[in-house]
Image: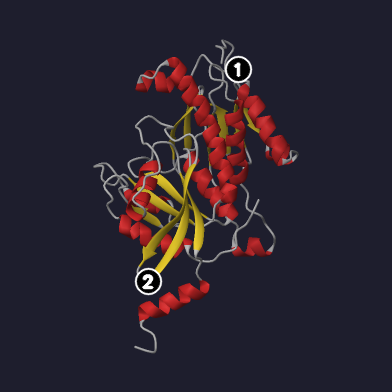
């Protein structure tokens, strides 16, 4: 062992080259568990929660954020502004809320209207984040156009992205499918609901989002 | 969208036609055609940034009883080889199919084929 131990050397490197603060957007299609994950992160590091969750899609229709969430990884840490964004979709049909979830017609129309505004808000936030935690449902086909579009957009902007393969507590989940679908990005299997593997996610978040990068603005 | 007994238009749009447009014009063209109930197959698809813009524009155009949004499927950009990069060949988005969400449904997609279904009785 030289002058510095392995950990302290990494610590010094991080102090010199690492970032101290990053604004991280939690993105993904509706109902993949974005708010559940935001709540998990906040509960673990601040004792707070971000917002309500529901099985009805588009529960989050206005972006919510929490500033200065300190996430630690051994000797290094990163302050993050966590932004929980509304789900991105290419269509919003109020009849789905009526027929599948039994909401009233008026309530469904209002929800659909707010959902469309939420999608636009999510897309606007892409201009203002330093990195993205892209949440995908590990029980679903990952090759959806929304996933591919978001990832392509982040790559074009040169924004760092971590893919959270969520819902691995479900029997039919397949995080391996997600990993093979997007081999160019780190994929962390997690259960935002149970907290399974969240420690690994936090480690990766500090490592990945803590690196200094030049961001490409559009 | 109203029922149309004459059938559904599926328009194949050439790369040349799309290249004539700026990004904004391209999105306007696509959205107008799709709102009319047409299915478009673009020979030369949209960049991820354009696709994201198209989603945002679509959300602004949603009319709850007549237009619920779009179905879009396509393949990612071609990745140029090192030699192509040296020669200045830019990444090109590939074929994309776009239609009204209440008319066009994606059945299956893999790296070789996008399988869609058109719901009869709608569109133009």
Of residues A72 and A215, which is closer to you in this image? Answer: A72
Of residues A133 and A110, which is closer to you in this image? Answer: A110
Q: Give the residue drawn at x 48%, y 34%.
A: A61
Q: Residue furthest bottom?
A: A2
Q: Give the residue drawn at x 74%, y 38%.
A: B21
Image coordinates for residue B76, horizontal then vertical, percent: 54, 47
Image coordinates for residue B57, horizontal then vertical, percent: 62, 33
Question: Rounded to the nearest whole Å, what is the CA distance between mark 2 and mark 1?
Answer: 63 Å
Q: Which chain letter matches label 2? A: A
Q: Which chain letter matches label 1? A: B
Can see residue B41? yes
Count residues near mark 1 (Cα–Cα under 10 Å), then give few for <14, some for 14-19, many for 20+: many
Q: Give the residue drawn at x 52%, y 72%.
A: A17
> Regarding mark 2 in the picture, which secondary structure is present there?
loop
Count residues near mark 2 (Cα–Cα under 10 Å), then give few for <14, some for 14-19, many for 20+: few
In the depicted structure, whether residue B121 falls above or below residue A61: above
Image coordinates for residue B91, horizontal then vertical, percent: 63, 53
Q: Give the residue drawn at x 39%, y 36%.
A: A31
> Regarding mark 1 in the picture, which secondary structure is present there?
loop
Comparing labels 2 and 1, the label whose residue is closer to the camera: 2
* Label drawn at residue A75: 2
Image coordinates for residue A56, horizontal then vertical, percent: 37, 29
Can see residue B40? no
Horizontal side of residue A140 vs A129, given as left or right: left
Horizontal side of residue B114 vs B16, given as left or right: left
* Label drawn at residue B74: none
| Residue designated by label 1 | B124
Marks 2 and 1: same chain? no
Quarter of the image where the N terminus of chain A is located: bottom left
């Amino acid at each position: 062992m030289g002058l510095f131990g392995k950990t302290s050397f990494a610590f010094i490197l991080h102090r010199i080259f690492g970032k101290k603060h990053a604004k991280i957007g939690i993105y993904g299609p509706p109902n993949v568990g974005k708010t559940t994950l935001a709540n998990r992160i906040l509960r673990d590091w601040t004792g707070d929660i971000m917002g309500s969750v529901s099985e009805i899609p588009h529960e989050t229709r206005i972006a919510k954020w929490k500033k200065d969430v300190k996430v630690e990884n051994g000797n290094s840490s990163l302050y993050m502004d966590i932004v929980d964004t509304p789900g991105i979709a290419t269509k919003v049909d109020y009849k789905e809320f009526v027929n599948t979830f039994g909401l009233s017609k008026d309530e469904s129309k209002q929800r659909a209207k707010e959902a469309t505004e939420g999608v636009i808000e999510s897309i606007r936030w892409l201009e203002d984040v330093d990195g993205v935690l892209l949440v995908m449902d590990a029980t679903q086909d990952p090759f959806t156009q929304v996933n591919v579009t978001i990832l392509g957009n982040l790559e074009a902007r040169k924004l760092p992205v971590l893919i959270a393969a969520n819902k691995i507590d479900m029997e039919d989940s397949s995080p391996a499918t997600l990993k093979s679908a997007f081999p160019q990005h780190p994929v962390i299997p997690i259960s935002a609901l149970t907290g399974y593997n969240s420690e690994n996610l936090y480690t990766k978040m500090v490592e990945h989002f803590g690196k200094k990068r030049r961001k490409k603005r559009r | 969208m109203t029922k149309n007994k004459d059938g559904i238009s599926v328009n194949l749009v050439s790369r040349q036609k799309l290249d004539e447009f700026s990004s904004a014009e391209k999105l306007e063209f696509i959205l107008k055609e799709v709102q009319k109930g047409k299915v478009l197959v673009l020979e030369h698809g949209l960049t991820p940034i354009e696709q994201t813009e198209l989603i945002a524009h679509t959300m602004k155009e949603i009319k709850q009883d007549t237009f619920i949004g779009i179905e879009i499927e396509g393949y990612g950009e071609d990745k140029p080889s090192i030699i192509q990069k040296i020669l200045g060949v830019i990444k090109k988005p590939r074929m994309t199919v776009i239609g009204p969400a209440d008319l066009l449904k994606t059945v299956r997609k893999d790296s070789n084929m996008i399988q869609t279904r058109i719901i009869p009785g709608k569109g133009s």
